[in-house]
Image: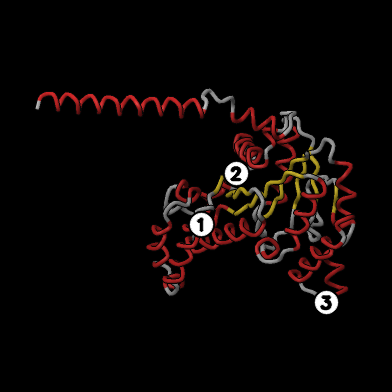
Amino acid sequence: MVFGQVVIGPPGSGKTTYCNGMSQFLNLIGRKVAIINLDPANDSLPYECAINIEDLMKLSDVMNEHSLGPNGGLVYCMDYLEKNIDWLESKLKPLLKDHYLLFDFPGQVELFFLHSNARNVMNKLIKKLDLRLTAVHLIDAHLCCDPGKYISALLLSLSTMLHLELPHINVLSKIDLIESYGKLAFNLDFYTDVEDLSYLQNHLDQDPRSAKYRKLTKELCDVIEDFNLVNFSTLDIQDKESVGNLVKLIDKSNGYIFSSIDSSAVEFSKIAAGPLDWDYYRYLAVQEKYMEEEEKDEYMEEEKKDDKI
C-alpha cells in the first residue's frame, strides 16, 4: 500500500513551491519522497523529480505540432497521458516499495472540474497500483481580500471536490503574505470555516460590478452552503509547524496513520470496534422480566383499590 498526494490548484497558487517544501519536510521526518512532475509546461523545476512527463512529451512540441494554444495543449497532453498510462505505471513501479509520492499537476483548473482525463489517470493508478492518495487543492490566500474572488475560489474548490472523488483538503497557501494584500473584512476563521456567506453580501454590494449580479451571487452562495463540504486549512510553506499540521490532516484523510498496523481489514475492524460488554439476547430477557414485574405491580395496585372499595 503506497501513500501520496495529488497537488492541484490554479496557476500561481504555489504548487511547485509546495512540492519542493513538502518533500524537504517529509524527508526530515524520515519519509522517502518521490516527486512526479505531470506538468508538461513546467520546464524549470526547483526540485529533483523521480519522474518527469517531459520525457514523454512537452507542451511546446504539442502546441507546435497540432497548432494548439496552451489550454488546448494541456488537455491534449492529459489525454495522451491517459492513453499511454502504461508508461507512467512502469516508471512508478520501482518507487512503490518504500516511497511516498507527490504528484505535481498543471495549473489549468479545467482539468480538474470539467475534463475527465486527469481524474481517469489517477483512478487507473489507484486501482492498478493500490495507491492511497489525497488531493491537496491550493488556493492563493490573497483571494480572501476580494469577496467576489473568494466566492469564485469556493465554487472552484467545491466543483473540484465533486469531480475528482478523492479524499480532499483545500488549502489557503501563502498565508504569511495575506496581510500585504490589505486588511481582511472578517477574521481569518470566517474564510477558513466557510460558515455564513451572507455576511459577504454587503461587501459585494459596495463594488458596482458585483452589485449588478447580486441575485446570482446569493444563489451561488446558497449552493456552496447547501453542499456544506468546503473549508480551508492554512499553509505557510516556510513554517515547519504549519506544514506539520497540514501533514497530519493529509495522513488522516488517506489512512497513512494506520499504515503501521499490520493486520487484515477484519482484524482492524475488531480493534476499532472493541469487544462487546453486553449480550443483546440477555438484554431482551432482562427487559421482559422488568416488564413482567411492572405488570405485577400494577395488578397489585388494582387489587388494593378493590379491597378499599
Q: Nearer the viewer, residue 235 or 46?
A: 235
Neighbourhood count class around disc 3 (C-alpha, 10 Å): few under 14, some 14–19, many 20 upward: few
Residue at horizontal 55%, vertical 55%?
A: 142
Question: Can you identify the residue that label 3 sits on?
Answer: 67
Circle 1: element type = helix
The picture quadrant where one finds residue 29 is: top right
* Amino acid type for the residue under numbered disc 1: Phe
Sequence-first tag of 2 and 3: 3
Q: CA distance from mark 1 to mark 2?
A: 24 Å
Q: Residue furthest left?
A: 309
Circle 3: element type = loop
**Disc number for residue 235:** 2
Sequence-first tag of 1 and 2: 1
Q: CA distance from mark 2 to mark 3?
A: 39 Å
The picture quadrant where one finds residue 251 is: top right
Question: Can you identify the residue that label 1 sits on?
Answer: 227
Q: Position of residue 133 (x, y in %)?
A: 71, 46
Sequence-first tag of 3 and 1: 3
The answer to whether 116 is drawn above or below residue 249 in the figure is below
Residue at horizontal 20%, vertical 26%?
A: 301
Q: Does the CB distance between marks 3 and 1 fall below 8 Å?
A: no
Residue at horizontal 45%, vertical 49%?
A: 190
Neighbourhood count class around disc 1 (C-alpha, 10 Å): few under 14, some 14–19, many 20 upward: few
Q: Position of residue 15 (x, y in %)?
A: 69, 51
Quarter of the image that includes the N terminus: top right
* Amino acid type for the residue under numbered disc 2: Leu
Of labels 3 and 1, the one closer to you: 1
* Amino acid type for the residue under numbered disc 3: Ser
